[in-house]
Image (cartoon, helix red, strand yellow):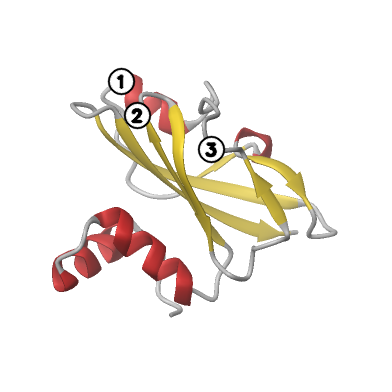
């Protein structure tokens, strides 16, 4: 799969196969050729982690049960009415604890929150410099 990894794609797959958005995200990651990761959180605590096969073993994301970084867009979406419309650059240290790619990286985040449930779905795009 080489199409963009975004919320429109996730929604379309979720609706087409009648599965949750989280299930759709993880299925997309199984086939995506890009450098993408996903983090699910609830009330500011990481509950789900995943990444495309191309990233497995090359980066370490924050751990399950850790608090999301207070400077992340995910935190901003959870605490305010902020709504992201696409990927935005963010410090890689916000989500990545170790880079094993052998080069510097840039990170882009795209988060959406459901304030009623306190959950946030965060999509990450990793680019090597």
| Residue on which disc 3 sits | 64
Give me the residue at 26% from left, 56% from top: 21
Image position of 43 (left or right of 50): left
| Residue on which disc 1 sits | 80
Q: Residues within 10 Å of mark 3 (few under 14, many from 20)?
A: some
* Whole-number angstrom distance, CA of label 2 to CA of label 3: 20 Å
13 versus 92 height, above or below: below
Q: Are marks 3 and 1 in contact (CB under 8 Å)?
A: no
Q: Quadrant of residue 66?
A: top right
Q: What x and y, as percent, mark residue 30?
A: 47, 72
Q: Quadrant of residue 26?
A: bottom left
Front of the two marks 2 and 3:
3
Q: Are marks 2 and 1 in contact (CB under 8 Å)?
A: yes
Give me the residue at 36% from left, 60% from top: 25
| Residue on which disc 2 sits | 77
Nearer-the-camera pick, 30 or 74? 30
Give me the residue at 46% from left, 77% from top: 31
Q: Quadrant of residue 18?
A: bottom left
Counting residues from the start of the chain, the first of labels 2 and 3 encountered is: 3
Q: What x and y, as percent, mark residue 124?
A: 51, 51
């Amino acid at each position: 799969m080489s199409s963009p990894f975004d919320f429109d794609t996730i929604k379309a797959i979720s609706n087409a196969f009648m599965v949750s958005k989280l299930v759709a995200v993880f299925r997309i990651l199984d086939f995506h050729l890009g450098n993408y990761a996903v983090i699910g959180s609830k009330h500011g605590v990481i509950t789900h982690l995943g990444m495309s096969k191309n990233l497995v073993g090359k980066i370490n994301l924050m751990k399950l049960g850790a608090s999301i970084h207070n400077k992340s867009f995910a935190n901003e979406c959870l605490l305010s009415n902020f709504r992201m419309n696409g990927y935005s650059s963010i410090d890689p240290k916000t989500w990545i604890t170790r880079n094993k790619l052998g080069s510097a990286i840039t990170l882009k985040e795209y988060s959406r929150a459901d304030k009623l449930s306190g959950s946030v779905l965060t999509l990450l795009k990793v680019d090597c410099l």
